[in-house]
Image (cartoon, rainbow, N blue to C red):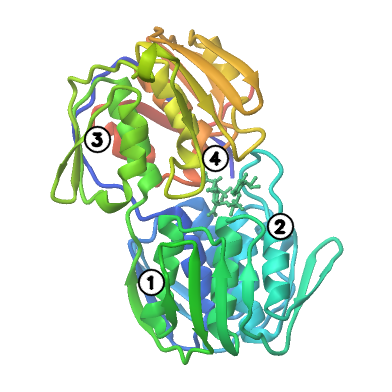
Amino acid sequence: MAPIQYIVEGGHRLSGSIEPAGNKNSALPIIAAALLTEHPVTLQNVPRIRDTETLVELVRSVGASAEWTERNTLHIHAKSIRAADLDPELCVRIRASILLAGPLLARCGEVMLPPPGGDVIGRRRLDTHVLALEQLGAKVTATDRLEFRCPKLTGADVFLDEPSVTATENALVAAVAADGVTYLRNAASEPHVQDLANFLVALGARIEGVGTNTMVIHGPATLGSATYRIQPDHIEVGSLIGLAAVTRSPLRIVRSGVEHLRSIRMGFERLGIVCRVEGDDLIVPSNQTLKIQDDFGGHVPKLEDQPWPAFPADLMSIAIVTATQCEGVILMFEKMFESRMFFVDKLIGMGARIVLCDPHRAIIAGPSRLHGATLSSPDIRAGMAMLLAAVCAEGTSTINNADQIERGYERIDERLNALGAKIRRVPERKG
Ligand SMILES: CC(=O)N[C@H]1[C@@H](OP(=O)(O)OP(=O)(O)OC[C@H]2O[C@@H](n3ccc(=O)[nH]c3=O)[C@H](O)[C@@H]2O)O[C@H](CO)[C@@H](O)[C@@H]1O
Ligand SMILES: C=C(OP(=O)(O)O)C(=O)O
């Protein structure tokens, strides 16, 4: 398939209502966890993006049936499955292929996983996955692939060496099938981890402490079938807040899942962007001050990411672009990934005033007028951040490798064009 290019005519105001897609990072572990039950599962509000399509192919490759019955409804039936060698080419396309470890180990007693892929945003360790599954009784061998074997998973008091999102998800799924009680401590608690836990409960699992950093799982569960709706994507909501702010546009983000937006709203408030809640809708008015809030005493403020419930790492790139349009100075501190900030070079090329202090910290002095440029999307979120920059810049920008954006955002060109953006999606031209 030819790579995709976005040609963006900047400088247009947007307005209207938009609904966020289902959470990509919920859909992926939930699709994988559907392999845990022999009974049929119906998933609604599944984002139809490259990552979910790839995982669906992987799920089919182990013998489950997986059919899209509507655009965003996926029916999975894993009546009988095999932990066959998974296709390395499919696994390397997505980080989420590692999420097959827990369910396949539980159902088949073994799994051989080629290395996962995903965004290249720094070293992405798998140690926490291995350590957690070992504590539940798995024997793990690492060669050019990871081999997990365990005829019988056993509940244990597991302490994760860091609150890794996907490792928590693998351990949670394995613990549901394990014999006895599992304590999962130092667990991640992101909205997508909660979504997965709620799906497992809908299948019949018993899990306490959902949304906290200690979950208690009473296994083994007798699992049935379920129809489950994926929650809205809080990262997409944050991206839309940034988009409204940089284009000074009024947006209503409908069915936005406001219960999970607190730290995100606080982060944007530091940039002088205040949203209003109406029911489950989030309103971003156009008359924002866009004035960065200094710390007490006039000191330079800082916005940093941390595991949930703090400001999410996946919104740092969006926050950086947004800050270029705000008045004042702010330090952006990306604590979790080593290579996520390098894309700021491209923003500097568009006219942004940014000093990249080191791989984790950047100082942004705004506002600056951005002008169109030729860009290339290195990862999902930097790509989306570049799209925001292009939509608010003067002139036309070209974003190559827009496939990366489409790994995470469904039909984003069509949906933003419906609000008044001017984005053309075309096959990438060489040269
Ligand atoms: C498919 C999926 O769900 N991907 C998400 C998942 O990836 P993933 O599960 O791969 O990310 P992890 O939570 O394992 O870790 C992310 C990075 O943060 C570091 N780290 C983690 C915890 C901590 O307390 N301190 C720390 O520095 C890790 O070493 C790693 O470099 O979670 C990430 C962090 O929210 C998100 O960016 C990804 O979008
Ligand atoms: C980093 C991300 O995804 P993945 O972990 O799937 O690469 C992301 O969603 O921003």
* For marks 1 and 2 on the same chain, the one whose residue lies earlier in the sequence: 2
* For marks 4 and 3 on the same chain, the one whose residue lies earlier in the sequence: 4
- Above or below for 409 versus 77: above
For badge 4, the amino acid type reads Gln
Residue 133 image offset from top left, x and y in percent: 68, 72
Q: What residue sits 29% from the left and 24% below the top?
A: 245
Q: What residue sits 39% from the left and 29% below the top?
A: 424
Label 4 secondary element: helix
The CA distance from mark 2 to mark 3 is 40 Å
* For marks 1 and 3 on the same chain, the one whose residue lies earlier in the sequence: 1
4 vs 2, front mark: 2
Name the residue carrying label 2. Answer: 126
Name the residue carrying label 1. Answer: 198
Name the residue carrying label 4. Answer: 404
Label 1 secondary element: helix
* Count of numbered labels shown in the rendering: 4
- Label 1: how many residues lie within 10 Å, few (<14), some (14-19) or many (20+)? some
Q: Can the viewer see residue 393 in this picture? A: no
Name the residue carrying label 3. Answer: 418
For badge 3, the amino acid type reads Ala
* Label at residue 423: none
For badge 1, the amino acid type reads Asn
